[in-house]
Image (tube, grey):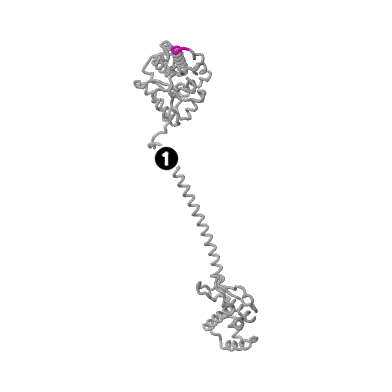
Amino acid sequence: MGKQSQSLLTAEEVIKLNNDFKKYRLSIPCPTGTCKAISMAPNGFAPHQQPKQPRFKCRTCSKGNVTAATMQKMINKIALEGQQQHPPPADLEMEHETTNHDPTSSQFSTETLHYIINELNSQKEQIERHETVFEELCKTKEKLEEATRRINELEQIEQNLRQQLEEKEQQKEQQDTNFPPLRPTLQGDNIQNSMASNWAHHIRKAAARVFQYPTNTHGFQYVYLPSRARIPVGKMRGTLRRFGIDNSQILDIQYPARQTIGLLVHNDFTSILLEQLAERNIHPVPFDPLDSKNIHDQKYENEPLSKRQEIAHELRSTRAKRAITFIRPPIKFAVARDFHTKGWISVDDLKAILATNWVHRDEPEELAKNFQSDDELDDFMETDHQTNQKGQNKRTYSERGTSPTN
């Protein structure tokens, strides 16, 4: 108890310590000596001590637990060093000694009061400067944090924009791969008219065939495909159009048997048609319209094989003649000759078809007759797409349903 009581400050000393601490708090270094900061702060009171003994700590590192007696010694040391740098006048020393002998004495000389006032003003100015610097540092810290936050936002925006730019470049590269660039027009070229279209290309190609010999593959054939149901001709042509197939090359559409559809095309167009259908996993099926097995009408079920083969030939001939009636000239004449060569129609049927009057809207009647008898024009395959399709669409399901094999 004796050692502890010697380390405790009296109530008057505690009051003086608090006043001295306020005066020298910006000059008291951290007692730990690690952070080298000069920022001490009160840290409450020691428990179970009377009078209450204040404690202190470093505000920067939050370390140290300085007792009141230790803090008083540190303040005295700082005050002593300050007096050595700025020694007070002689009368202040004398008065100070008198004050030590008589703490209640308050009689000081005028010079001593001026000295104290100047020192207090100096400390006040220093404190104010420190507070101003501290406020500026706080504001600078806030601005730095705001600038850092804004920089992070801008970096995120830049990253998003770069990602969007990369995606657009990839899409552009993919489009350039799928769609090759257009041929650059030469300087001074006029704007291309409708003759530059694909349809006009077919017209020019068809016109050029007039001055060419028929090809070795000249002729027509039916491409037979599987069909789940009997779709009207107009709807079927719409389906083929969605597949990218040129309907002007499909001269006839018929259903010769159950779940089977036949497309009449020129031999030169057959490979193109099969490629377009194969892209959609549609493949032709083997079908012989002259085979008696394809007669599904029950009334012919008990007929002999020779009779059934004759009926199959008649049905083939009926379908061929019906198809020719819906094909516009001059293609119908070439198709009729090809069907006669295959034995699908008779000579009399061919003569009746070739005797049909056909007058072109831009040609006289005599020239049209010559055009009918000219065999070299049988390979003239192209005709007006819209008119040909309109004639094909007139064929209805009811017209096809009259045949026993339909």
Say which residue appears at 52% left-offset and 57% top-offset.
150
Location of the N terminus by quadrant is bottom right
**Whether residue 367 can be seen here:** no
Q: Position of residue 59 (x, y in %)?
A: 56, 71
Q: How many marks?
A: 1
**Whether residue 294 can be seen here:** yes
- In reply to whether residue 306 is colored magenta, the answer given is yes
In which quarter of the view is residue 335 placed?
top left
Residue 326 or residue 127, whichever sits in front: 326
Image height of 92 relative to 343, above or below = below
Say which residue appears at 50% left-offset and 54% top-offset.
154
- In reply to whether residue 255 is colored magenta, the answer given is no
Residue 161 or residue 396, whichever sits in front: 396
Residue 20 or residue 34, whichever sits in front: 34
Q: Position of residue 125 (x, y in %)?
A: 57, 75
Q: Which residue is mark 1?
A: 176
Callout 1 amino acid: Asp
Image height of 112 relative to 251, above or below = below
Residue 315 or residue 105, whichever sits in front: 315
In which quarter of the view is residue 28 placed?
bottom right
Q: Residues within 10 Å of mark 1 (few under 14, many from 20)?
A: few
In which quarter of the view is residue 283 placed?
top left
Relative placement, left or right, of 121 versus 233 is: right
- Disc 1 element: helix
Q: Position of residue 147 (x, y in %)?
A: 52, 59
Magenta part of the protein: which range?
303-307
Q: Position of residue 76 (x, y in %)?
A: 56, 81
Image height of 66 relative to 136, above or below = below
Furthest-top residue in this view:
348
Give the overall secondary structure of the magenta segment.
helix
